Image (tube, rainbow, N blue to C red):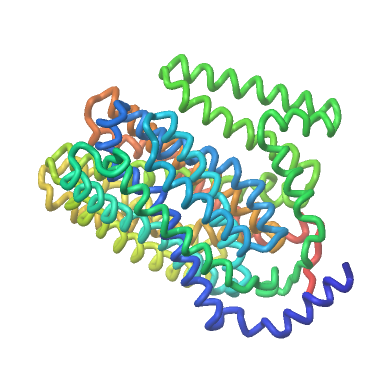
Amino acid sequence: MEQQAATTADEAEIRKSDIGGPYAWYVLGVLVLVYMINFIDRQIISILAEDIKADLGVTDADLGFLYGTAFGVFYSLFGIPLGRLADMWYRGRLMTIGLSVWSLMTAVSGFAQNFTQLAAARIGVGIGEATASPCAFSMISDYFPKEQRATALGIYSSGLYLGAGTSLFIGGLVVQSWNAAYPSGGPMGLMGWQAAFLAVGLPGLLLAIWVATLREPVRGLADGHITPAEPNPWGKFFTELSSIVPPLTLVHAALNGVAALVTNVIGLAIIVAGAWGMVMLTGDIPQWAAVGLGVYAVFSWSQSLKRRDPATYKLIWGTPAFMLTVLGFGLIAFGTYAVGFWAVPYAIREWGVDKATAGFLLGGGAAASGFIGVILGGRLSDRFRRTNPSGRILIGFLSIFGSAPLLVWSFTTTSETLFYILAFVNGIFASLWVGVAAATTQDLVLPRMRGAATATYFLGTTLIGLGMGPYAVGKVSLITGDLGVACMSVIAVMPITLISLVLVYRWLPEAEATRFERSGETPGA
């Protein structure tokens, strides 16, 4: 172990020039491409929604489940053990494996013949994509100093909007061209929406080869707190996995004593009762079974983490500023994901626009506005932070108050042209916060905890945002028969969002300043 630490220190002297240097920016560029592919594969179902609905006979609530819950719950669930593995193992290798898995499962989606098969493929995409951001956030945080971190993470996060926008354009073009050429189905009987999944899934396998060539950064070097390599990452990974994947969770709890098992079972009973109550209320078994599974898995993991790594638990789950960051920005993501998914079906239904046009106008606009917003938000937040420890959170307020009125205007206008213009402007405000939230969660923990912090942060943006937002809008649309009203309904969560961010703004400086003290660990060189 001493030799390992010494090797890391020697390597650190050589690699100091990487921090914020040309190679760091090269790595960031590759990671942006990875995130683009990530969101192309995730978002393309939006432009394909109407075809899938007609071909497979599903409802708007089912579409919300396919896009959000089926993907999001398993993304967040597996993101935790994979995030912890990113804290211990080679991040580039882990990302290479994950990229290969989610690209393959996207392609497999193209062969789905029913709702169940497509849902299973989407689960596979979610598991594979769970590797990307924990690895990327951790690598970027080790390649860039703190004063550049929000900008770098904002640039990385721009891949979200570039990918989401590109997916709409590519998907609309492929499905429309394919259906025109093969109105009754093409080779192997594939319909246009199935061909689109294949078209965006396969290129990711080539990108995985490129990712495998990236140099692994020295963990913690940018913060002056070098963390030696973990000698036994796989044993700890499987321990982490067993703490979150049912029914292994019960065995894991039992091995930690009767008290741990009783706590786990009580938590399981409460969550099952809550999920059953929602099933009775809505009639949507897949949705609430998946959400219940996700909530139980997270509960089980948090209790296990408290026993196994109290320092990490204390800085994440035991830090109100961190938890409210997850909740507050997760609720912003609730609206962002919901509107991002349903905007294209709304345009198609409201004005009868063809898919290629909708994909180009909304997709191109989303890519441009998202890129502008996330970069602008990152730069502004880094500037605000120089004079105010909580300055980044101001960008969250700007995002909320700028987006809400534009959202209402977008879904009440009778002008198709104005709808596209408002969608573009709203996209800038709605994306300002992304780098801010990422950088805030990274600053609240120690370098060795960054993968776990990222995974926990994504619990909010996936379990709350992606897992609930698109489904909720689809359900409201099903009940009211008005997709526009359903899209505007996301504003209902704004009061909780604002309260959460106000408290984060107040508590953040002290929480960051005391992280070493509260963890019981000391800064090292």
Position of residue 372 relative to residue 241, above or below, is below
Q: Position of residue 193 (x, y in %)?
A: 29, 43
User: Is the C terminus in the top left, top right, bottom left or bottom right quadrant?
Assistant: bottom right
Q: Position of residue 479 (x, y in %)?
A: 29, 22
Q: Nearer the viewer, residue 1 or 226?
A: 1
Q: Residue furthest top?
A: 280
Q: Residue at x 58, y 56 (%)?
A: 97
Q: Quadrant of residue 251?
A: top right
Q: Residue furthest right?
A: 2
Q: Residue at x 18, y 56 (%)?
A: 421
Q: Position of residue 130 (x, y in %)?
A: 55, 49
Q: Quadrant of residue 306?
A: top right
> Could one spot residue 16 in this view of the protein?
yes
Left or right of 520, for residue 499: left
Left or right of 25, for residue 179: left
Q: Nearer the viewer, residue 462 or 214?
A: 214
Q: Position of residue 426 (x, y in %)?
A: 28, 54
Q: Residue at x 52, y 62 (%)?
A: 208
Q: Quadrant of residue 194?
A: top left
> Could one spot residue 395 in this view of the protein?
no
Q: Residue at x 47, y 36 (%)?
A: 70
Q: Nearer the viewer, residue 448 or 492?
A: 448
Position of residue 209 relative to residue 187, above or below, is below
User: Is the N terminus in the top left, top right, bottom left or bottom right quadrant?
Assistant: bottom right
